Amino acid sequence: MNLSSSRWCVMAVVGYGALACSDPVPLPAQGAINTQVSAVSPPVQGKACSAGASFTYDVPQVREDHPDDVLDDGTYIYKVIDGDNNATVKCSVKGGPVFNFSGNIVLNGEGMEVTGGTVDATLKGTATITIKNSQHLSSSLISPPSSCAIDIVTTNAGPQVKAGSMWAHFSCPAVEAPPSDSCAAQGYFVFENCAQ
């Protein structure tokens, strides 16, 4: 699915036929994540992934009822919208062809935060990622600064990044909660209707 945003203009009659255009009302931020957390291989001495060998989660929850529709590099169907059903979605995607981005998606104690993200003209970049999952983790896991690799998804419609939206794969060799929790994480995220 191609990322898109809609723009519209309200025309009003003022006096005898004069027209005025108001700024469009911004749409609320929306998006989705699909995340796999796993033990680091080889293990880091003195550290372990307290979540066990591996767990996967998505926001919104899709895999239980619609496993073929889970967010990946070719499927983006389901999303959460900021303010709907207690979901929080905040994001910023600015620039082009070099983009700076950040975002946060949380619903029912599960989510992910992306900070300090950059993507260059090769559609690759880095970011800092925080994993949030109250069901599997006693505290959030955060990557070292700018250590997660970001790759923009490309569909038949082209690269899925522009000012205000992006769809990407992420891979973090380490997400940690000091002093002893250390896991790896990878997956996909989509941010739409973001500040630009």
Image (spheres, rainbow, N blue to C red):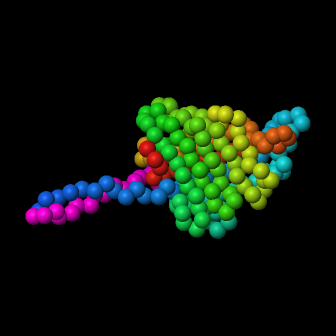
Query: Closest to the observer: 88 or 159?
Result: 88
Does residue 76 show up? no
Range of magenta residues: 1-16
Query: Closest to the observer: 171 or 147?
Result: 147
Residue reaching furthest to the left? 16
Residue 130, position in %: x, y?
68, 45
With 155 as the anchor, is 72 left or right in this view? right
Query: Closest to the observer: 144 or 59?
Result: 144
Does residue 131 show up? yes
Q: Residue 13 occupies which quadrant of the picture?
A: bottom left
Is residue 64 on the magenta stretch? no
Residue 66, position in %: x, y?
62, 65
Q: Residue 14 occupies which quadrant of the picture?
A: bottom left
Q: Quadrant of the C terminus?
A: top left
Is residue 15 on the magenta stretch? yes
Q: Residue at x 70, y 52 (%)?
A: 132
Q: Residue at x 61, y 44 (%)?
A: 114
Residue 93, position in %: x, y?
48, 43
Q: Residue at x 88, y 34 (%)?
A: 45
With 82 as the anchor, is 45 left or right in this view? right
Query: Closest to the observer: 82 or 53?
Result: 82
Q: Residue at x 84, y 39 (%)?
A: 179
Residue 59, position in %: x, y?
62, 58
Q: Main secondary structure of the magenta part?
A: loop
Residue reaching furthest to the right? 46
Residue reaching furthest to the front? 15
